[in-house]
């Protein structure tokens, strides 16, 4: 598999072709969040770096969850040459995945194509057995049901997951973060940053950012006391409440409290509380100009050295590096394929963009 390291700018790259498989009731915002960065990558570079094709199982129009209808470019079995396929899911995903989808996705995997999904589209890949042993992301509303239905898939709460040749993201605008990461890895961070600026996208989130999953969707409605305890923790990050007091507030013993956390959240109450405080600290470091000392204080840490130690242990980097924007390397990138001479949507969009002041404004 070809990979390009940061800063590398290989010449004579051919356009990469990505197929977006649209399932019934897919979410339009997730599709747009994935496609628009590709269009803007072409516009800002002044080159056809990417092509995209919309596909359905039979080539007929499909309705998004908001009722808007999309006429696809082709049926999936008549798709042009592709180097990656991204499944776009949405509402009622369990009934949107057809046997034909499963068979076709398995064929794409056997042919060595990269596979991805946005919103709830990961369900289709998991149904086809293509996420077994892979880290993957899915919209939080589908999280619990996927964990139960597909125990061999490592389903996370991260906004997006890139694991070898599987690229999956949750819904909403999260696909944009995933695509910006892939574009940045393949064509340089300057291009990714330029795309972000064009979309007024304040911060490109990374693989370590998590969805804000409502606890009730992780626990169901059977654990009201545990949900109440977590709500108390979230409301008291600056001055953490003692665990005995938390137990007293909801009228259970300290021992019962610890059992609830171990059984349903798979960690101790103190560890979970620490995680909440560190996640809040990460948000403040990335989104505000507060000093590290101030962040440590408002997140309930008695000293900056203790805060830095805990932060490094949890996130793998110290707070000062987080503030500086250091990120990990070696994300999987899309594979190039021989250029196909087709009059694609990407070519038409690139032609239209030539009149824009930003056309070819980023050199790669």
Image (cartoon, helix red, strand yellow):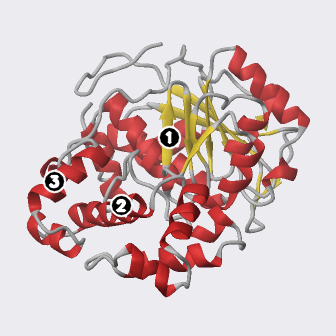
Q: Earlier in the sequence, mark 1 or mark 2?
A: 1
Quote the CA–CA distance across marks 2 and 3: 29 Å
Q: Position of residue 45 (x, y in %)?
A: 33, 37
Q: Which mark is residue 161?
A: 1
In this view, the mark in front (1 or 2): 1
User: Quick check: 52 above or below 262?
Assistant: above
Closer to the camera, 256 or 164? 256
In this rendering, would 226 be left or right of 27? left
User: Quick check: 197 above or below 180?
Assistant: below
Q: Is residue 351 visible?
A: no
Residue at image position (30%, 47%) is 315
In this rendering, would 197 be left or right of 54? left
Q: Which mark is residue 308?
A: 3
In this view, the mark in front (2 or 3): 3
Residue at image position (48%, 86%) is 249
User: Quick check: 239 above or below 355?
Assistant: below
Q: Residues within 10 Å of mark 3 (few under 14, many from 20)?
A: some
Q: Tell me if label 2 and label 3 are in contact, CB under 8 Å.
A: no
* Quarter of the figure with the C terminus: top left
Residue at image position (27%, 41%) is 316
Q: Quadrant of residue 239?
A: bottom left
């Amino acid at each position: 598999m070809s990979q390009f390291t940061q800063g590398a700018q290989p010449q004579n790259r051919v356009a990469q072709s990505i197929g977006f498989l649209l399932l019934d009731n897919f979410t339009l915002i997730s599709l747009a969040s994935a496609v628009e960065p590709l269009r803007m990558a072409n516009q800002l570079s002044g080159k056809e770096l990417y092509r995209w094709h919309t596909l359905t199982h039979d080539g007929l129009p499909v309705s998004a969850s908001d009722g808007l209808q999309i006429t696809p470019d082709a049926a999936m079995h008549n798709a042009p040459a592709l180097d990656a396929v991204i499944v776009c899911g949405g509402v009622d995903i369990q009934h949107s995945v057809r046997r034909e989808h499963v068979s076709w996705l398995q064929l794409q995997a056997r042919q060595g194509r990269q596979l991805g999904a946005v919103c709830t589209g990961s369900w289709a890949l998991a149904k086809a057995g293509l996420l077994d042993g892979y880290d993957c992301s899915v919209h939080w509303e589908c999280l619990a049901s996927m964990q139960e239905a597909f125990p061999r898939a490592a389903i996370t709460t991260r906004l997006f997951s890139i694991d070898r040749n599987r690229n999956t993201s949750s819904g909403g605008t999260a696909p944009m973060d995933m695509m910006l990461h892939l574009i940045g890895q393949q064509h340089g961070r300057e291009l990714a940053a330029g795309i972000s600026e064009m979309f007024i996208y304040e911060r490109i989130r990374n693989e370590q950012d998590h969805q804000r999953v409502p606890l009730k969707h992780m626990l169901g409605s059977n654990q009201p006391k545990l949900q109440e305890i977590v709500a108390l923790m979230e409301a008291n990050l600056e001055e953490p409440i003692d665990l005995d007091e938390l137990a007293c507030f909801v009228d259970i013993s300290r021992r019962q409290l610890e059992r609830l956390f171990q059984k349903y959240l798979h960690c101790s109450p103190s560890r979970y509380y620490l995680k909440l405080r560190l996640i809040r600290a990460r948000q403040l470091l990335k989104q505000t100009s507060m000093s590290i000392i101030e962040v440590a204080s408002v997140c309930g840490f008695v000293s900056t050295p203790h805060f830095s130690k805990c932060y490094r242990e949890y996130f793998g980097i110290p707070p000062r590096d987080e503030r500086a924007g250091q990120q990990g390397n070696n994300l999987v990138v899309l594979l190039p394929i021989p250029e196909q001479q087709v009059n694609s949507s990407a070519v038409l969009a690139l032609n239209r963009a030539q009149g824009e002041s930003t056309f070819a404004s980023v050199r790669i």
